[in-house]
Image: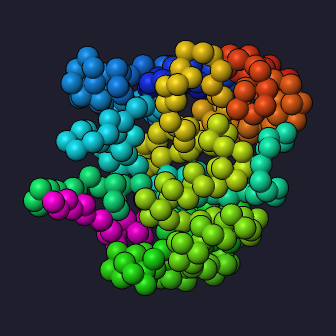
Amino acid sequence: MKNYKISIIKGDGIGPEVISATERIIEAVEEKFSLNFEKIFVEAGLEAYKKYGTNLPDFSLEKIKQSDCLLKGPTTSLEGEGTELGVPVKIRKYFDLYANLRPLKNFPHIKSIFNGVDILIVRENTEGMYSGLEYKLSEEVNVGLRVATKTGAQRIMKVAFENARERKKKITLGHKSNVLKMTDGLYKDVFESVSKSFPDVEAREEHIDALAMKLVMEPQNYDVIVLENLYGDIISDLVAGLVGGLGIAPSANIGENFAMFEPIHGSAPDIAGKNIANPIASILSFSMCLNWIGEKDASRTVENAVINLLKKGEKLTVDLGGNSSTQEVSESIAKEIASISV
């Protein structure tokens, strides 16, 4: 039996519900594949802030460091001048999780604007406008610094091209170097340089505004899209809207030696505690976790179990047009995992 240590942040709002549902999937995977996940529960988010005055205490970071990977539920970030950076931003920076992978595609029986969409957003995760470097110059002037480094650009381009090579061998860089000549210009230059090492991958560039327009007109034409931090955050939500919403949108935050997996969606406090939240994004994030630790058969099985459930169209949460509870969906996916031949 293989053993892994997985730290878990349940999060805020619907976080505990979708993470609890994902824990049921972890159990199903353990049983089917003779794996053991030692769960290390970590306090972080709004509730931690209320108790300790910070959303990510040092002792929580120490717990995370004891694990092989992190599964994180959505956390609520405080807004307004002088508030802390959000939990995911802090973790990305602390562990240098520079590559944010967001796969977005059509699933069976999920209403969407387009068919045939299968896009991987590769987002730089530690720089850009999310560097947290903001200053008040006067009562009337606030300034935020947008950071772009050659090292940061090179390593995210390498990840993006490697993923493109494993998919349809097509990659697009979104930038605005005609205006942001130095920061986006750096990304453009590095993209063109790295592309020379991947002659088998078709590489093209588009201005970010034109890219946004084309994605809502012809998303089927795209495969891997590589973007700096802020662009990646916005465009991935846009594409999620094209394929059915954030309830089916997972993500991986990957560094050299550690990774965090989390659904893209927020904590949705308006539906918290009602047991109606869609757990699929969290469950698919765990599938990405399995792939990252090398349990590829288990990863494929979890994703196929989700697809099988959706094909049947019977156990769906309200956002997907059904009336099943969070736990009912999770239990149904667990049963699908048990029934799949490997």
- Residue name at image x 41 percent, y 54 percent: 125
- Residue name at image x 82 percent, y 34 percent: 310
Point out the image quarter for the N terminus: top right
Q: Which residue range is magenta in the image?
A: 140-156
Name the residue at the right extreme: 312
Residue 305 seen in render = no
Q: Is residue 223 magenta?
A: no
Viewer-proximal residue among 228 and 153:
228
Point out the image quarter for the C terminus: top right
Viewer-proximal residue among 331 and 64:
331
- Residue name at image x 29 percent, y 65 percent: 147
Q: Position of residue 259 (x, y in %)?
A: 46, 42
Judged left or right of residue 124, residue 263 is right
On screen, 175 above or below 141? below
Q: Is residue 155 magenta?
A: yes
Q: Quadrant of residue 334?
A: top right
Q: Quadrant of residue 295?
A: top right
Viewer-proximal residue among 14 and 293:
14
Judged left or right of residue 94, residue 109 is right
